[in-house]
Image (tube, rainbow, N blue to C red):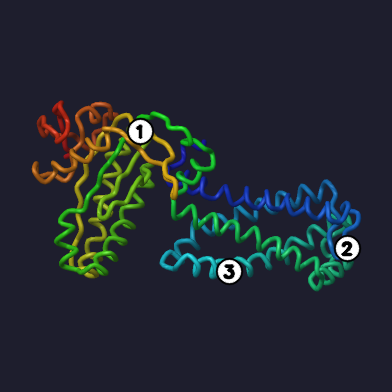
Amino acid sequence: MFNSLSPATKRNIIRILPFGFIWLTLGVIFMFIEYAALGGFDNVSSTAIRVNSQILVFASIAVTILGLLIGTVEVIWLNKAFSNKSFTTKIVYKFAFYIVFLFLVILITFPIAASMELETGIFDKRVWAKYIYYLTSITNLSTFVQMSVSLFACLFYAEISENIGQNVLLNFFTGKYHQPVEEKRVFMFLDMKSSTTIAEQLGHITYFKLLKEYYNTLTHAIIKHGGEVYQYIGDEIVISWPFEKGLQNQNCIRSFLAMKQDLENRSAYFQKTFGVIPTFKVGIHAGLVTTGEIGALKKEIIFTGDVLNTTSRIQGLCNELGVDNLISKELADQLPYTENFSFKSMGTHDLKGKIASLELVAVV
């Protein structure tokens, strides 16, 4: 079932799940600390809920759902709403928003837990007497602090993940590339046309703003077709796919076509805002790379291999051949057949630094 979902949906689910895990883990830790400090749950104050197996299961499910709910709000809406704010400003604003949200959650969940403990209906007077007593107690403050810690941990995770990339963060945690591994991948080198002229025309600050909007416009197509941004290099993006994923549904080609269409759809905006409409050229190729963690002062996961240089050289021939895309014939022959587009042979070419010539095609 998960495999039938779109790459964008899969990505959102993978981004949301850690929120539930963080809340559940910290909830268990806080409960254990409270248990150890009090010498057992039988010694809790009269303001708190006495924990039994039923309450424990309810609390675990509740905090996990709460974490997933916060993750959903964060990924789907709130992160986009504060995308132009600084790291510190985002943390402060989001923290304030979620604190209000968590207070409302406590208002709803405490009476339910109290009714379960007292084995009575939720409208029983004893439930609401306990509820009012709880809201003015130190126990409420303790719960609030615990939830604030969980919230801060989630927000910190979200910002770090956003800055270095979800896949990169997961790979660091799992240690997938702690030891170098060899794998086959598809690479796309995407370069803005006439970027030097545009930068001189707009000035550095305005050009940077254009570059930011340009990257934002291209991002949806990359995600939709399962691509991973490997590097931003000035006005160039290096996009990568695991080999099978890049071939599946012609993702590496459809991604290029979708990015081109999305940029055309926003052409009026770019013309009105910046006075120019950015366009790009791409080179696409596949091959073996060695992937691993590297760096002493700053850790990164990098790819090394001849395929990177070859893909860059392929892209560099676009202007010479008068096209906006070039794909190695070797890769094109391995793509599933489709009637939605076809390839035009662009001949065999010598690439700088390579002994063997390479046959290239273009999407038409």
Q: Residue at x 74, y 60 (%)?
A: 109
Among the 4 quarters of the image, the one containing residue 338: top left
Q: Secondary structure at mark 1?
A: helix
Q: Nearer the viewer, mark 3 or mark 1?
A: 3
Q: Nearer the viewer, residue 239 or 252?
A: 239
Marks 2 and 3, Cα distance to the nearest angstrom? 30 Å
Counting residues from the start of the chain, the first of labels 2 and 3 encountered is: 2
Q: Which residue is mark 2?
A: 45
| Above-or-below relation of 299 to 134 | above
Residue 69 location (% of width, % of height): 60, 56
Q: Which residue is mark 1?
A: 248
Q: Secondary structure at mark 2?
A: loop
Determine contact: label 2, label 3, CB under 8 Å: no
Q: Residue type at mark 2? A: Ser
Among the 4 quarters of the image, the one containing residue 269: bottom left
Q: Nearer the viewer, mark 2 or mark 3?
A: 2
| Above-or-below relation of 135 to 67 | below
Residue 309 location (% of width, % of height): 24, 37
Q: Which residue is mark 3?
A: 97
Q: How many C-alpha atoms fall within 10 Å of the one at disc 2: few (<14), some, or many (≥20)?
A: some
Q: Secondary structure at mark 3?
A: helix
Q: Nearer the viewer, residue 189 or 78?
A: 189
Q: Residue type at mark 1? A: Gln
Residue 316 location (% of width, % of height): 16, 43
Q: How many C-alpha atoms fall within 10 Å of the one at disc 1: few (<14), some, or many (≥20)?
A: few
